[in-house]
Image (cartoon, rainbow, N blue to C red):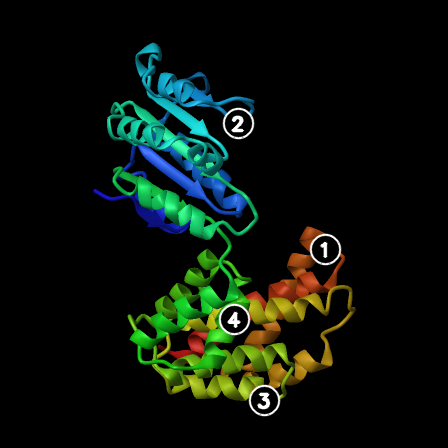
Amino acid sequence: MRMRVLTPKEFARTYPKKKSNVVFIFGSESAFIRRTLELVKETWKVPPESIKDFYDAEDVDLAKISDALTASSLFSSENIVILREAYAFFKGLSSREKESFLSLLKKLPATTCFVMVDSREDDVSSSEHSMLKQLASVDGVAVNCRRARSGELKAWLRKKLAKMGIDDSSLVEALIEASGGSMEALQKELEKLLTGFNKDSLSKTDSVSVYDFTNAVLDMDVKAFELLNKLYSLDVQPHIIIATLESSLRNILLWNVGLKRFPPFVERRFKKILENVGEKRVKELYEKAIVLERKAKLTASGDVLRKLLEGFVLDCIWPALKI
């Protein structure tokens, strides 16, 4: 089997079930790298003394790596060997040493896991690709933690959306912005959208309506809640509205921490939807938020507003959609 290249999320989902003897982690996303290493350790269930980490070693040659990989019999349980700055190590090997190294990886005992990590920030994608190509004959997993460039993200997303019959640049930009430039976050945004619609595909009408609404709230557009009415006629699951509202309303909250009363622009937008969900229910939620504030001794009215908006979304918008 060839080495598979996965995102951190894909790796976390599949690795515990199909753990591999060889794991290659590359990229600049240090948080993902740390999480991936922890997952490897958890999956193999090894004690700290069974982990050989060459991170601080000044000189790491092939002989030391070979000894560490073949010394599993010295340990009472399974064994993990971690090599940092793997690309520099691999690049420094002669052709014969590379062959010997790859042969060693193919013959790893079932009790041993070899983890190669390379976390440089500079652009070495072509070199990493060359290294992966040579490692492809090994039955292992490569985890891509490198922060993708904007162009790469757009190309990937356009390809995904094209399969759904969507060619919408505004949707692409909105998803890219929401992802913060992270491939993992972008996959999450796309999954959230599709899961919310409970579909394997997404029509342009669906996507534009949802993102129009989000952007309208963010822009403090008076027509924001009018757009919600358009969503009533779509086959939209309630939690997509909630998921979409969440980020938008949180942004509004940032502008209101410390205020003493309900901001007028929020009040105006609520009035648009109050006609549909009932002003009495919202008043009850507001009173509940005040009680929560007193119990928690919260000083920022933004916390009260947050509690109100959370209840408003869950208790008012959801039932109003009646889906």
Q: Tell me the amino acid under the disc marked 3.
A: Lys
The image quarter containing residue 152 is bottom left
For this rendering, which residue is in front, 317 or 206?
206
Mark 1 or 4 closer to N-term? Answer: 1
Percent across and percent down for residue 288 are: 61, 64
Q: Is residue 250 above or below residue 132?
A: below
Q: Tell me the amino acid under the disc marked 4.
A: Val
Q: Tell me the amino acid under the disc marked 1.
A: Leu
- Kindly tell me whether residue 283 is visible in this rendering: yes
Percent across and percent down for residue 45 are: 36, 26
Mark-to-mark CA distance, 4 and 3: 18 Å
Q: Is residue 239 above or below residue 82?
A: below
Mark linked to residue 223: 3
Secondary structure beneath dot 1 equals loop
Give the quadrant of the C terminus: bottom left
The image quarter containing residue 248 is bottom right
Mark 2 or 3 closer to N-term? Answer: 2
Near mark 3 (Cα within 10 A), the count class, few <14, some 14-19 or many ≥20, is few
Q: Residue at x 64, y 57 (%)?
A: 292
Near mark 4 (Cα within 10 A), the count class, few <14, some 14-19 or many ≥20, is many
Residue contact at pointers 4 and 3, CB within 8 angstroms: no
Mark linked to residue 298: 1
Residue contact at pointers 1 and 4, CB within 8 angstroms: no
Mark-to-mark CA distance, 2 and 3: 57 Å
The image quarter containing residue 220 is bottom right
Per the image, the residue denoted by label 4 is 313
